[in-house]
Image: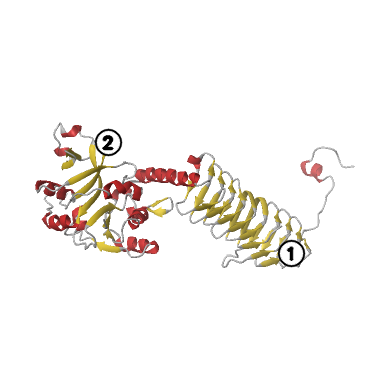
Amino acid sequence: MSTSVIILAAGQGTRMKSALPKVLHKISGLPMIHYSIKTAESISDDITVVLFHQAERIEKEISKNFENIKFKIQDHANYPGTGGAVMGIETLHDRVLVLNGDMPLVTPESLEPLLSQEGDIVMSVFDLPDPSGYGRVVVENSEVQAIVEEKDCTREQKEIKTVNAGVYIFKKEVLDRYLPKLSNENAQAEYYLTDIIEMAREDGLHIIPVWVEEKAFKGVNSRYDLAHAEEMMQKRIRERWMRSGVTMHLPSTIYIDSRAVFHGECTLENGVTIHGESIISDSYIKSHTVVEDADIKNSSCGPMARIRPGTILEDSQIGNFVEVKKSRLKGVKAGHLSYLGDARIDEGTNVGAGTITCNYDGVRKYETRIGKNVFIGSDTQLVAPVTIEDDVMIAAGTTVTKDVKKGSLAISRTPQKIVERFFYRFFGKGKPDA
């Protein structure tokens, strides 16, 4: 049965204690609302996101990644609350799924038990060992009889472990019938969707409870919740890639952005961090290496290397404490302690320890081009823009400021001077001067 989706994202999220809207806080590289919308897209062609607090900012962010999303600005001044958020929304289909923008762990699979039920209202519930602080859901004869706030519970009702998970499916005609009847005569002076449950029950409508897993329907209301949700998201991401053939050493220490992609046989050692839209193919990433929006093919990186945005590595070996930024390396060895920024380096080239591409003059950035079979000695500075042609040797300690032609040796050193017996004279000890 076709279903419309309404995603609630109008709240201020004061418990986050942040100027950033709650639903734009990131989990594994993406705003948490991204995951709710992605899930909604998999089940519906009619999605409405309800906004209020910093609405323009949230809409702009969503529109970067999604098309055909409808937006509704809640009339918060006159109709606050979850019920007020849903008022006035025109949906295309006869069933309406109400999701929350701060539930990033909800998946199409976790919603399937709700979507497969038929009832006037289908609501998600789960059981908690200690439900203190939650309203209780009273279930009798496989139907919801009431939702009772804890402060209103009788002694018997406080023993109930079943609580509201906050996701609903309504028949469109149910919303049309009861939304106009909602009242804000309560302590918070807000209009609540849960009040529809009570009115529908009194009219004999069928309200079906569906038990769901708490971890999938977890809401994010604080920085602690955000961190906990990311832990669960990371576990899900790592498990997905390990099942696809990626080897991970001590996987709990590895961070992988939700946008990262792996191809072929890849290995990640402990402490690896993969950010952004990185693509890693048939490569070995050693311990404590950071990869950011890079494309790595048939290469090894690390330990403790940093591969920054815009980098393409192919058939290359990047060693410890090497930083590569916005560069393309093919068949290159850079063993340790180097910075290669805005560079193009071709196959067979060896980069010695301490090599630096001096790519920034304080105003603009320039490119360094290095050809095939170039041997770069240790402690070399390449002052861009500069081109090193094929089959070149650069002596250790050289500062290269001019292009170097094919087959040449580049060397720039001050003459070495030796002052005999200087040590003894300087410190005034040891063997006397002859």
| Residue 434 found in image quarter | top right
To which residue does mark 2 refer?
A: 128
Crowd around label 2: few <14 · some 14–19 · many ≥20 (10 Å): few
- In the image, residue 15 lies at what x, y percent? 30, 47
- In the image, residue 269 lies at what x, y percent? 56, 43
- Of badges 2 and 1, the one in the foreground is 2
In the rendered image, is residue 220 in sight? no
Query: In the visual, does 44 lie left or right of 338?
Result: left
Q: Amino acid at mark 2?
A: Leu
Q: On screen, 274 above or below 343? A: above
Nearer to me, 41 or 323:
41
In the rendered image, is residue 90 in sight? yes
Q: Earlier in the sequence, mark 2 or mark 1?
A: 2
Query: In the visual, does 412 lie left or right of 257?
Result: right
Q: On screen, 302 above or below 397? A: above
Query: In the visual, does 167 lie left or right of 62?
Result: left
- Label 1 sits on a secondary structure element that is loop
- Label 2 sits on a secondary structure element that is loop
**Do the CB atoms of the residues marked 2 and 1 lie less than 8 Å apart?**
no
Residue at 61% of width from left, 67% of height from top?
366
To which residue does mark 1 refer?
A: 390
Residue at 60% of width from left, 53% of height from top?
323
Residue at 34% of width from left, 58% of height from top?
41
